[in-house]
Amino acid sequence: MEWDRFGGGGSVMVWVCVSQHHRTELVVIAGNLNAVSYREEILLPHVVPFLQAHSDMTLRHDNATSHTARSERDFLQDRNVSVLPWPAKSPVLNPIAHVWDMLDRRVRARAIPPRNVWELVGALVEEWGNISQQELANLVQSMRRRCTAVLNAAGGHTRY
């Protein structure tokens, strides 16, 4: 689960969750994301219910300070949310980076590009809905290959 920024006609911060068989709605975050807003705008309304409905899943987020603050770790632990440990300064292996790229390319390829932040939000929501679950599943399934490739390369360069 991640959030990221998009440019072109303005800038917004968005967040989504993907798994092999499920996805959340695209969430637009107002302002900057800190530990409190991450908990109140993402974890509480989206992550916790999603993971409670899919108890076999593990949360994978990056090492952003809003994700790793002690208050957030305690919050997740208190709700029995399993978090995948992720080393600091690790290679970018998370398939969500490819989701952001796919979404960005789709928005930029629109016949009429967004002219302001509201149009950008609308375009992101629409294009998110146009990405098939199979495309997301393919990216999630690539995670094991990505990790194996990095381990085999002893942390060095891989094709990912």
Image (cartoon, rainbow, N blue to C red):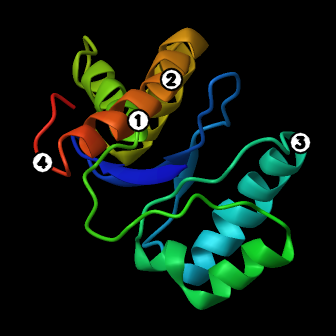
Q: Residue at x 80, y 41 (%)?
A: 56
Q: Kindly give the residue lying farthest to the left in the view shown.
A: 157
Task: Tell me the mark number nearer the camera, choosing from 2 and 3.
Answer: 2
Q: Which residue is mark 4?
A: 156
Residue 137: give x, y in percent of width and height.
Answer: 55, 19
Mark 3 is surrounded, within 10 Å at the Cα level, by few (under 14), some (14 to 19) or many (20 or more) other residues, namely: few
Q: Secondary structure at mark 2?
A: helix
Residue 143: give x, y in percent of width and height.
Answer: 44, 33
Question: Between marks 4 and 1, how big is the CA–CA gap?
Answer: 18 Å
Side (left or right) of 142 relative to 82 = left
Q: Which residue is mark 3?
A: 53
Look at label 4 and name its amino acid: Gly
Look at label 3 and name its amino acid: Ala
Q: Which mark is residue 141?
A: 2
Question: Between marks 2 and 4, how big is the CA–CA gap?
Answer: 21 Å
Looking at marks 3 and 4 on the same chain, the residue that comes earlier in the sequence is marked by 3
Task: Tell me the mark number nearer the camera, choosing from 2 and 1.
Answer: 2
Side (left or right) of 150 relative to 94 = left
Question: Between marks 3 and 4, how big is the CA–CA gap?
Answer: 37 Å
Mark 1 is surrounded, within 10 Å at the Cα level, by few (under 14), some (14 to 19) or many (20 or more) other residues, namely: many
